[in-house]
Amino acid sequence: MELLDRDILGGFAFRWLHILVGIAWIGLLYYFNFVQVPGLAAYGDEGKARNITIVNIAQRGLWWFRWAAVATLATGILITGIVDDYFKGFMGEDSVFGIGHNVSISVGMVLGITMAANVWMIIWKNQKVVIANAANVLNGQEADPNAAACGRRALLASRQNMIFSVSMLFFMVGASHFYNVFARTASPGDAWLFFFIAIAISALLQLNCLGIFGGTAPTNKLLWPYENHKNAIISSFVLWGVLWILSEIILG
Ligand code: HEM
C-alpha cells in the first residue's frame, strides 16, 4: 500500500485530490465569469428568465463552487502537514525544500486562501441575498431593494478571484517545477522582499475589489479590471506578468 506511505500520501495522493477539487472550483469560477454572468446580462429585461436561471442554475453551481473551494483549501493545507518537514527552515538557507520552492508556494497559498475567503465571505454572503430575492420575486413577492448592490459586490469579488487565479496557479505549480530550480540559490532577504511585494500588490487589488478606494459604483475608474470579463482576463495576465518579472529580478 504505497499510497499510505506518508510522503506519497501527501506528495502524491493529496496532490491529486487537491488538483481534482481545484479544477472543480476554478472550472466553476470560469463558468460563472465567462458564461453565466454574460449570459444573464444578455437576457436584458427578461426578468423572469433571469430569476429562473438564478434559482435553478446559479444556486446549484454555487453549492459545488463553495464546497470545492473548501476541499481545495483543506487538501492544500493537508499536503503541507503530511509531507515530512514541508516548511522546515522556511525561507532560511537550510530550508528542506529550498527557498525558491517555499517562497513560490507561499505566494500561491496566500492568493488561494484569499480566493477561498472571497468565495465564502463576499461571493456567497451576497449571492444568498440575490438568490432569495429571485425566488421571492418568482413567487410574486416584493423585490429586495438591496439585491442589486449585493449582486454587484459578489461580481467584483468573483472577477478579482478570476484575476488572482492565473498567478495563483503559476506560483502553485511553479513551486516544485520552476522556482525550486531557478530560485534555489536566492537569499532569504530577497525571498522575503519578493514575498512582501507580491502580497502588497495583491492586497491592494483585493481592497480595490471591495470598493475601499472610491466605492463599488461603475463610475469608479479604479474598478476598470472588473467591469467586464475581458478586462478581467487582461488584468489577470498583467498581474501575472508583473509578479513573474519581479520574481526574475529579485530572486534570479
Ligand atoms: C485554496 C488554497 C490552496 C492551498 C492552501 C494550496 C496548497 C498547495 C500545496 C501545499 C501544494 C504543493 C506544492 C508543492 O510543494 O509542490 C499545491 C500544489 C498545487 N495546487 Fe494548490 N493550493 C490551493 C489552491 C489551489 C487551487 C485553487 C488550485 C487550482 C487548480 C490548485 C492547484 C494546484 C496544483 C496544480 C498544484 C501543483 C501540483 C504539482 O505541480 O505537483 N491549488 N497546492
Image: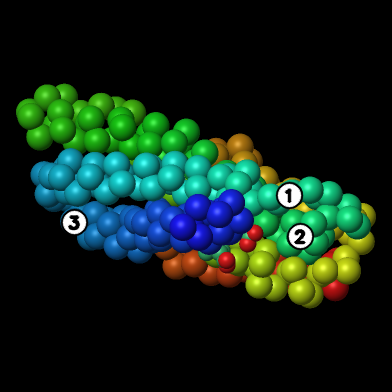
Specify few, some or many for label 3: CA neighbours under 10 Å numbering under 14, 14-19, or 20 or more.
Answer: few
Instruction: Identify the secondary structure beneath mark 2.
Output: loop
Q: Is mark 2 within 8 Å of ligand 1?
A: yes
Of pointers 2 and 1, the one earlier in the residue sequence: 1
**Mark 3 / mark 1, whichever is N-terminal:** 3
Label placed on residue 43: 3
Q: Which x, y percent locates residue 2?
A: 50, 60
State if disc 1 and disc 2 touch (CB < 8 Å).
Answer: yes
> Relative to 59, does residue 30 appear above or below in the rendering?
below
Q: Is residue 90 visible?
A: yes
SS for dot 1: loop
Q: Residues within 10 Å of mark 1 (few under 14, many from 20)?
A: few
Quadrant of the image containing the C terminus: bottom right
Q: Looking at numbered disc 2 in the image, what kind of residue is underneath it?
A: Phe
Cα separation, mark 3 vs mark 1, equals 53 Å
Which residue, given by chain and number where applicable, does mark 2 sit on? 97
